Amino acid sequence: MVVLILARTVREAVSTMDFAGDEPHAEAGSRGPKTTWRNPDATLMMRGMARTFEDLVAEADSVSVEGWDFSWLDGRATEERPSWGYQRLISERLASVSAALDVQTGGGEVLAGVTRFPPTMAATESWPPNLTKATKLLHPRGVVVVANQGAPPLPFGDEAFDLVTSRHPAEVWWDEIARVLRPGGTYLAQHVGPASVFELTEHFLGPRPEARRKRHPDDERAEAEAAGLEVVDQRWERLRTEFFDIGAVVYFLRKVIWIVPGFSVDRHRDRLRELHERIERDGSFVAHSSRVLVEARKPA
């Protein structure tokens, strides 16, 4: 049975949101969502407050959203980090295997933070801007970045890897993961859990009770087991996310396109204005991201 941990409702003023890829400097073996705090410049925290709705929206609608770097949100949004420290976990595992694969690597930001790679290290990515960025970032470190079509099969032979990792995959191809793992091999990943940032989704789209079950850890466990994998660890946390100006919301929704499918400033201007007024009144908009750590093993 999955363990759900409701993270303490505190602000972690980190330099980038958790989606970005760099991990908090959590102490090894710490319990609960213990992180190192990094306070953003106070002027950044205030920069949205003296600007108009139109200015904030126009700025956020014009900047590039390529790659998986969220540093544009410095001082404008925060997100608590999961307690397990995913980047640290995969760093430890990658140092102990001979061949590994990172699936849906994005711009390679998370993998680039790993200290030591195994002799054989590959990564896949399908979105061209991310593929270019990941190639530039990872090739100098000996990682082979392979383009795929965003759908099965994975472009590798059977039983090719000791370890498969993935951070926030859009879709989990359990059968393919089981196929490319060697007997005794492990899948270690951090997934986006159910109803992640759903306060924002439902502000724009209205109540969506039918969608709240999607990506539920119990369902993912059943899918993994159906593919022949044994789930040996599964942890679920809900984490406080806070937006301090409407520009941060626009940028986030342009970048993380599945939160509000079909989002555009023109289409959703009225709801954006309502949210802007709410942020002006309350000081921020609070939502909760959902993260699941999953470790599944292929029987030897």
Image (cartoon, helix red, strand yellow):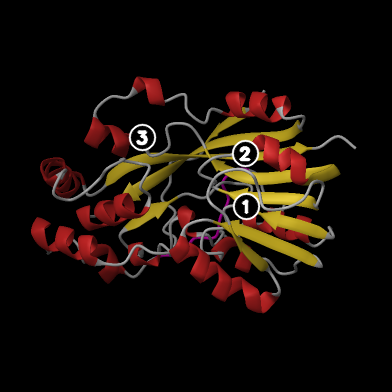
Look at the picture and state if 32 lies above or below 236.
below
The quarter in which the N terminus is drawn is top right
Q: Secondary structure at mark 3?
A: helix
Q: Marks 2 and 3, how far apart in space?
A: 24 Å
Query: What residue appears at the point 27 percent right and 44 percent down from the top-left corner?
Result: 285
- Segment colored magenta: 32-39
Q: Residue 111: which quarter of the image?
A: bottom right
Q: Residues within 10 Å of mark 2 (few under 14, many from 20)?
A: some
Q: Are marks 2 and 3 in contact (CB under 8 Å)?
A: no
Q: Helix, strand, or loop for circle 2? A: loop
* Disc nearer the start of the sequence (2/3): 2
Q: Which of disc 3 and disc 1 is earlier in sequence?
A: 1
- Count of labels shown? 3
Q: Are marks 1 and 2 in contact (CB under 8 Å)?
A: yes
| Magenta highlight on residue 37 | yes
Report whether residue 85 is seen: no
Q: Which residue is mark 1?
A: 103
On the rendered structure, is 282 left or right of 258? left
**Mark 1 is on which residue type?**
Val
Give the position of the C terminus as an image quadrant.
top right
Structural crowding at the residue carrying mark 3, measured as other residues with C-alpha within 10 Å and reported as few (<14), some (14–19) or many (≥20): many
Q: Is residue 72 left or right of residue 24?
A: left
Query: Which residue in the structure is indicated by mark 3?
Result: 198
Q: Earlier in the sequence, mark 1 or mark 2?
A: 1
* Dominant SS in magenta: loop
Q: Is residue 158 magenta?
A: no
**145 or 259, which lies in front?**
145
CA separation in Å, label 1 and label 3: 25 Å
Q: Along the line of sight, which residue is nearer the eye, 2 or 43?
A: 2
Q: What residue is pinned by disc 2?
A: 173
